[in-house]
């Protein structure tokens, strides 16, 4: 098989590996969320959840190792076949986009930044003025729906399948324990992203009505977002 053929074959394998990784990541995060709310008095169920999570972590780690090896191999083939046929270049561009969606590569570009903080304790129910996991999850979902290419919370990359859950007084993002304030950045069309968040009666209005402190979206010319990491891996 010539270099061009090897590039096409390798790109196909990586596409399959990426799909497998996203599926495993989703199942792992689902299991982690279930494990975060252990079934009281049912040690058998809790043990099964822990074992399932361990299996998924191992599967995800093996898939990442395989993908890293394939990515290195592709980089070598890409150098060999630089300037070759349009079909190979189209595949390379497609894979670059899929790597971004999978969070495998750092990205940078224009976008917006929003800071979310707990509200001021003015009553007896402190829970009402805390930034919860669903608050951040709704904000991230709104950004992706508005066309964000990449999103990060306190410098941790989040995907559509990312685990965001409350763990006591902090919020866990992909297994990383974070406390307020939360700085959320998103890469994409700044005008579109800002408009989606600031629309009257939209998500930021709802947060402010709940008593949370939310900044006005700030436009940034060059936001840097790292690759996805999950502390549950390895």
Image: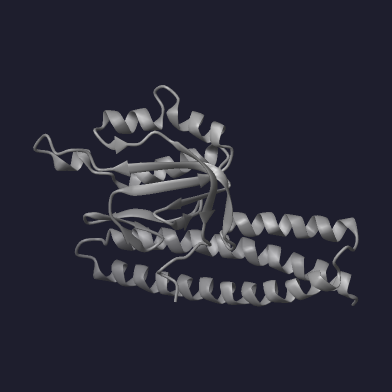
Picture mark count: 0
- Is the residue 157 above or below the residue 110 in the image? below
Q: How is the image coloured?
A: one colour
- Residue 63 falls left or right of residue 53: right
Residue 164 in the image: x percent, y percent? 38, 53
* Residue sitting at the far top: 200
* Residue sitting at the far front: 221
Residue plotted at (49% across, 33% down)? 194
Residue 5 in the image: x percent, y percent? 87, 70
Residue plotted at (58% across, 56% down)? 107
- Residue 168 falls left or right of residue 226: left
Quadrant for the N terminus in the image: bottom right
Residue 45 in the image: x percent, y percent? 31, 67
**Residue 201 picture quarter:** top left
Quadrant for the C terminus in the image: bottom left
Residue situated in front as seen by the camera: 160 or 120: 120
- Residue 164 falls left or right of residue 75: left
- Is the residue 147 above or below the residue 52 in the image? above
Residue 159 in the image: x percent, y percent? 50, 53
Residue plotted at (55% across, 32% down)? 191
* Residue sitting at the far left: 124
């Amino acid at each position: 098989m010539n270099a061009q053929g090897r590039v096409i074959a390798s790109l196909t394998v990586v596409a399959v590996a990426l799909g497998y990784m996203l599926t495993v990541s989703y199942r792992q995060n689902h299991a982690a969320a279930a494990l975060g709310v252990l079934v009281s008095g049912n040690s058998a169920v809790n043990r099964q959840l822990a074992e399932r999570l361990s299996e998924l972590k191992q599967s995800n780690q093996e898939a990442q190792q395989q993908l890293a090896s394939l990515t290195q191999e592709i980089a070598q083939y890409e150098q060999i076949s630089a300037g070759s046929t349009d079909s190979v270049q189209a595949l390379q561009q497609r894979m670059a986009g899929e790597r971004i969606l999978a969070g495998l590569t750092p990205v940078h570009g224009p976008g917006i930044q929003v800071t979310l903080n707990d509200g001021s304790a003015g009553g007896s129910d402190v829970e009402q003025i805390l930034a919860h996991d669903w608050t951040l999850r709704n904000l991230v979902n709104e950004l992706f729906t508005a066309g964000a290419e990449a999103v990060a919370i306190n410098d941790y990359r989040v995907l559509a399948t990312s685990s965001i859950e409350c763990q006591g007084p902090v919020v866990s993002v992909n297994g990383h324990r974070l406390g307020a304030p939360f700085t959320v950045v998103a890469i994409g069309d700044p005008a579109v992203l800002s408009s989606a968040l600031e629309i009257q009666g939209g998500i930021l209005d709802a947060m402010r009505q709940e008593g949370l402190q939310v900044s006005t979206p700030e436009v940034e010319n060059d936001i840097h977002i790292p690759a996805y990491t999950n502390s549950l891996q390895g």
